[in-house]
Amino acid sequence: MKRLPKNVYRVVINAPIEKVWKELTKQDGLCSHFFNARLDTPGLQVDAPVRMRSKDGKYTSVVGEVLEWDPPYTYSHSFKFTNLDDPYCKVTYKLKEVEGGTEFTLINENVPAGTKTADYMDQGGTFITETLKAVVETGRPTFKQRLLLSVIGMTAFMTPKVCLSENWPFDKKGDYNDADFQPSEQED
């Protein structure tokens, strides 16, 4: 399967790196920047499973495993939407202290070309970076972001049964192997 080149989204957040890292990796509530999902994991460390779950935990929208963990600078994980039959890809978050705050970079790699995953990742990258910036700097998403999050909440009842969290336990391993991919070149 052909893979897309890296997509990179970058923003400077007017806050210390520790504050940005804490919001990015929080597990004690909903993450507005992750479309109001809750990060669920037995522990953020390399090889640990990660799940993005609904507020009530009933549904899981994204699954993966931690590939790199270097607080407060780098967090990388494999990534798969549970409602799609597309293969795994890779997401990396990089933080760097800069004049005026923290540079936050989101990198999507090995995204399967011509898939719904590719479409969703392209739309999601901008939302994630802009919403994380708004939440860290002001304490909440912008009005436009809150409207989108409300719509997502109102349509939750339409979530497919394949996304039920019981189908995505922590011991269910994915088939992502970073060494198997050469972005933009690999094809079936």
Image (tube, rainbow, N blue to C red):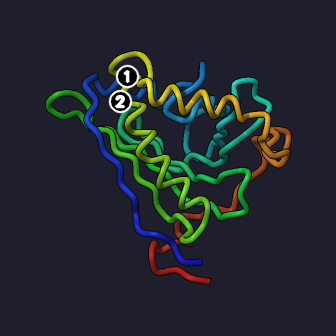
Residue 158 in the image: x percent, y percent?
Answer: 78, 40
Q: Residue under circle 2?
A: 133
Is 10 situated left or right of 48 in this image? Answer: left
Q: Find residue 156 and report its image quarter.
A: top right
Q: Residue at x 37, y 22 (%)?
A: 136
Residue 33 in the image: x percent, y percent?
Answer: 49, 33
Assign the C terminus to one quadrant of the image: bottom right
Q: Residue at x 53, y 25 (%)?
A: 26
Residue 119 in the image: x percent, y percent?
Answer: 54, 59
Q: Residues at badges 1 and 2 in contact (C-beta under 8 Å)?
A: yes
Residue kind at label 1, given as amino acid type: Val
Q: Find residue 117 and report its image quarter.
A: bottom right
Q: Residue at x 65, y 37 (%)?
A: 52
Q: Residue furthest bottom?
A: 188
Residue 136 is labelled as 1
Assign the N terminus to one quadrant of the image: bottom right
Residue 15 is labelled as none
Is 147 situated left or right of 100 in this image? Answer: right
151 or 35: which is nearer to us?
A: 151
Q: Residue furthest top?
A: 139
34 or 68: which is nearer to us?
A: 34
Residue 15 in the image: x percent, y percent?
Answer: 28, 22
Instruction: Measure the C-alpha gap from mark 1 to mark 2.
Output: 5 Å
Up/down of 114 relative to 108, above or below: below
Is 61 situated left or right of 46 in this image? Answer: right
Mark 1, residues whose alpha carbon is within 10 Å: few (<14), some, or many (≥20)? many
- Asked which secondary structure carries label 2, the reply is helix
